[in-house]
Image: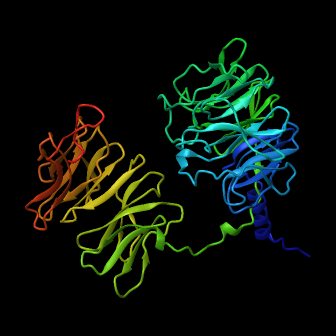
Amino acid sequence: MHVLKPVGVLALASLLSLSAAAQTKLLRFPDIHGDKVVFTYGGDLWTASASGGAATRLTAYPGVEVFAKFSPDGQWIAFTGQCDGDEQVYVMPASGGVPKQLTFYPAHGPLTPRWGYDNQVYGWTNDGKRILFRSMRDSWENPVTHLYTVSMDGGPAEQLPMPESGAGAYAPDGARMVYAPTARDFRAEKRYGGGEADQLYIFDLQSHAAKLITDNPRASRDPMWIGDKIYFDSDRDGHFNLYDYDVKTAKTTQLTFSKQWDLRWPGTDRDHRIVYELNGELQIFDTKTGKSAAISINVPDDGQTWRPQRISAAGQVEDAGLSPKGERVLFAARGDIFTAPVEHGPTRNLTDTAGAHEKHPAWSPDGSRIAYVSDKTGEEEIWVVAQDGSAPAEQLTTGGKAFRYHPEWSADGKWIAFGDKDGVLWALSVADKKLNQIVHSTHGAITSYEWSAKGAFLAFDMNNSDGFGSVYIWNAADGQTHKVTDENFDSGVPAWDPDGNYLFFESVHEFAPVVSQAEFNYATDRG
């Protein structure tokens, strides 16, 4: 007798098993102690073995819990949390339990992403009795912050003596600290080398003497003091990598050499291991061997977010416009392109692509097609689709590099104009998909352009070298471009009259200067 094996069921079970064991991404703000790592995932705190494997959830509150730090003995975890709504410092057993709130001064926030979090935990004092954190409580504006400590048993916070502080860590002797006077960890600028870049100092807590230890104009962040060396991350080579500074010899050495991803948010066991985030995963650097090892962590998922869901797009509508005859409304929402009737008829999702972002829809003059921008191929390109969804969408451009802006149809439907992030203004011939470069601005992207109602004339504005904008007209018939405004005045936002005979634009022509109150000079603030 032959036994039929359920091959399909076995294959599915195998697939699910592989999926369940896969590395989870977006693991952030890690710390390490003994055989455990703690990190944030999905706004909650999780722990896992330092050798990898399945993670265990520690928190599940409505707000976020971030910047978890093990106590020196590994028995406690301090963190910044929104467990009770406000952003405060909490402590809880490392094995899990009810968090205890330690700070109560009202936090600044919620803050925009560039400012990060208030009451940000950085670690512990060496004796494990107090928690080190950065707060805005005594600040007159967001970027001015100070370091404080608070007892794990509760009580008032005590400010450390630095006049202004970002990140900080105690020396093994407890008499000194390494700290950054500024807090720019959440700023989006890459390879920033200006005067606000994080620099590191050694600060004597008794004499209040400070010594600069970083020797590069780019940022040096997240200091950690282990033995006679201070470890930190910096993007001085183009990407954030790990470095050490030898306190005895004053020599700085690069330790990791990532050329693709930034090394972020390192935490240490204060002995010889540093855990950090790289490409959304965790790696552990051993200061004794000088080598990093990736750890594969799986965060269990209850599957709720995998199920198909109906989500209202009503509050996320953008780029709305009417059809040529005013019968339907065109708009983008949640990465798809929709049309809806003004009075009667069905609503249509013309793209319905869960894995792509569609935006900037524009109706063709004859009402038959809709042009839009999509990153379906991995880069933003111009696509067109039948307005009734009767045919598949067609890709018109290739070779895009990141952002492309607002396709605009010519009145005869033969051309589509669009700009890109590199400052190039393009005219796309719809019939043969040929791209014509109209102009390349070296002083910013071109985002304001409009076709005339009669004839294929494209008006646009472009910045000059002095920062003023000028209005230009491109003639599709001969490919010639002409400047039509005086470059001594700042002009832009061109718009044609309905007949295409006149071009309107905004321009600053009257300056109405006033004498400055602070110094004897003129200010033209009423242009």
Residue furthest out toward the top: 249
Q: Quadrant of residue 347?
A: bottom left
Q: Is residue 302 above or below residue 143?
A: below
- Camera-side residue of 384 and 391: 384
Residue 386 on image: x %, y %: 35, 72
- Camera-side residue of 380 and 285: 285
Residue 200 on image: x %, y %: 62, 25
Residue 435 visible in the picture = yes
Q: Which residue is rendered at x = 34% and y = 86% of the image?
A: 343
Q: Is residue 480 above or below residue 327?
A: above
Left/right of residue 163 with respect to residue 463 in the rendered view: right
Residue 219 on image: x %, y %: 56, 30
Left/right of residue 464 with respect to residue 194 in the rendered view: left
Q: Is residue 475 above or below residue 240?
A: below
Q: How many marks?
A: 0
Residue furthest out toward the right: 1
